[in-house]
Amino acid sequence: MRTMLESKTNRVVLYVSAFLVIVLVLFALLRDNADPITLKEATKILEKHSVKSVVATQEYVYLKTDKELYKIAASQVSPKMFIDYEVKVKNSSNVIVYLLLLVLFLGFGALFYRWFQKNSIFKTQEAKETRGHYASEQSGPIESIKSDVTFEDIGGISDVKSELEEIIDFMKKPKRYKSFGARMPRGVLLVGPPGVGKTMIAKAVANAAGVPFYYQSGASFVQIYVGMGAKRVHELFVAAKNNAPAIIFIDEIDAVGKKRDGQRNDEREATLNQLLTEMDGFENSSGVIVVAATNKIDVLDSALLRAGRFDRRIFVELPTNKERALILSKYLEKVPHEVDVSAIANMTVGFNGASLAALVNEASLLAIRQHDFQVTIDHFHQVKDKVMFGKKKLQILSPKQKEYRVTYQAAKVICATYFDLPFEKLLLSNEKLTPATDEPLLQHELESRVKMLLAGVVACAIRYHEHASSAKGDLDEAKEIVEKMITEYGMGSSLMASQNEKEILMQKLYTQTRELLESLQSVMSDVERVLNERESITKQDVKKRLDAVL
């Protein structure tokens, strides 16, 4: 680099020097160095006959002697003064001057062309260097990271921890296992929905075992340059083996480990082949364990899942009520609060660990915005739907539309409370009341959810004989549940569903919902009044009103 800079500097100095030489030559040639004289002095010089030549221009007459050169204004002399001399008439044009000017012009043109050419080359080189830098950056030296995550930092994973303790103990005391001829699994696959803490679990294992932790995402192996992904995999395993015992963690392994169809051999498949080869190349004494995470185990290649590669699979599910309470307790340790953790756990059915962290953070930010001294249960009620469903702009409703909306939401909240569905508070602006769940549910629980979803449409039909288009989301979910109940869960009149079984079940649930709401018109009116005034109502408030009439 230093040599290149010196060479460039020398060229610049050379160009500047040449330019200065040309300027100096032009200055010397164009400079008029004749001494100006008066008419009297010119007459004396001519009378002495010491003038060798006389040159006349448009402005001056030049008298040249052996030693000096004089000039006198042409307007001061007369032709009679030079009767004894040959007068040469000099044109204003000078061939030498023009040649030098041409040289100067060509020099500037050459410099400009050189500069343009250099810039073009530079840009091309820069593009190549950028691409090369990207490739080298991606394939740069792989270094381990030190994990500061402990199992105490992760709440509600007691089952997962017990599965991993054996691996931690093996990495700490490998001789104990080898003496029994046992070998630990070469790979551990963490399977679970997004946000349940799979990455944190892997980091906690590395921290507990006290070994180097090599983290890579599956997407980082899929390169646009052929062979780079496979090279990256090889470098990762070499680095881990050189620092064994160690843990390699590949996050979102489905990005590189998808099933091969055999019809093409692209970069992803080459990378997967390299990964399979590296895992086969493990010696029992290598001391390297591969931990991978995915939420799509069904798309992984079968060769990746066979024994000898990812021998052990650990399913990390959504936290239970008790586990949610433990996770919330962890996140609330540094938050000034006055809340019952179990109450928040009850209202967060379907939340994963990441969602619970976001919930606590949003509640804290709301408390700060409202200038409160501590976080309360009301803050959690206000931000729960924002975390669960996302913040949506409240639609501007006309008085008539709001009237329909109030009736629709009142019916839903009454049914949800009557059937004791999991929710804590309803807002008039919310489209959804409770989150959908894939947990095993009994038939009557599924029917209760469908009734809640139909309640708004039923109430509007009773009151107004029509409903709004905003019911689409609830109707779609109700139809989906009924579809699964009949075709997948065998909850119809027989295990082999008939052609019109879904329609029969939907009509039955609609009729039962109508009968329920017609019997609770007084509660409907009361809840509608509250929603009109406050635009929100809690499950506890609705329960009190139901208990009063039931």
Image (cartoon, rainbow, N blue to C red):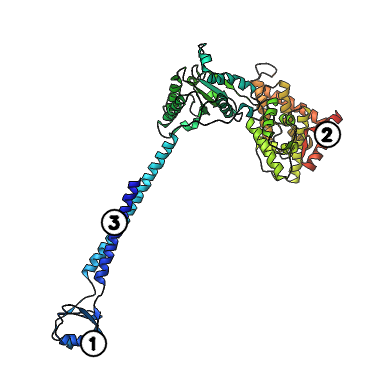
Tell me which amino acid carries mark 1: Leu
Which of the two discs, 3 and 2, labels the residue nearer the N terminus? 3
Q: Residue furthest right?
A: 548
Q: Residues within 10 Å of mark 1 (few under 14, many from 20)?
A: few
Disc sitting over residue 524 in the figure: none
Assess disc 3: are there few (<14), some (14-19) or many (≥20) residues with their C-alpha within 10 Å of its C-alpha: few
For this rendering, which residue is in front, 462 or 118?
118
Where in the figure is residue 534, as x and y percent of width and height? 78, 42
Relative to the observer, which residue lies in front, 355 or 409?
Answer: 355
The residue identified by callout 1 is 39
- Horizontally, residue 503 falls left or right of residue 41, namely right
Closer to us: 53 or 455: 53
- Looking at the rendered structure, the kind of residue marked 2 is Val
Q: Is residue 43 left or right of residue 271?
A: left
Say which amino acid is labelled 3. Answer: Leu
Q: Judge left or right: residue 484 versus residue 172.
A: right
Position in image of residue 44 (x %, y %): 19, 87
Quarter occupied by residue 108: bottom left
Could you tell me residue 72's position as x and y percent?
Answer: 24, 83
> What is the number of the mark on residue 523?
2
Between residue 321 and residue 283, name the one nearer to us.
Answer: 283
> In whole angstroms, how far apart are the C-alphas of marks 2 and 1?
127 Å
Which structural element holds mark 1?
Answer: helix
Q: Residue at x 48, y 28 (%)?
A: 256
Local crowd size for mark 2, using a 10 Å CA cut-off: few (<14), some (14–19), many (≥20): many
| Pointer 3 with pointer 2, Cβ within 8 A | no
- Residue that carries the numbered disc 3 in the rendered image: 14
Q: Earlier in the sequence, mark 3 or mark 1?
A: 3
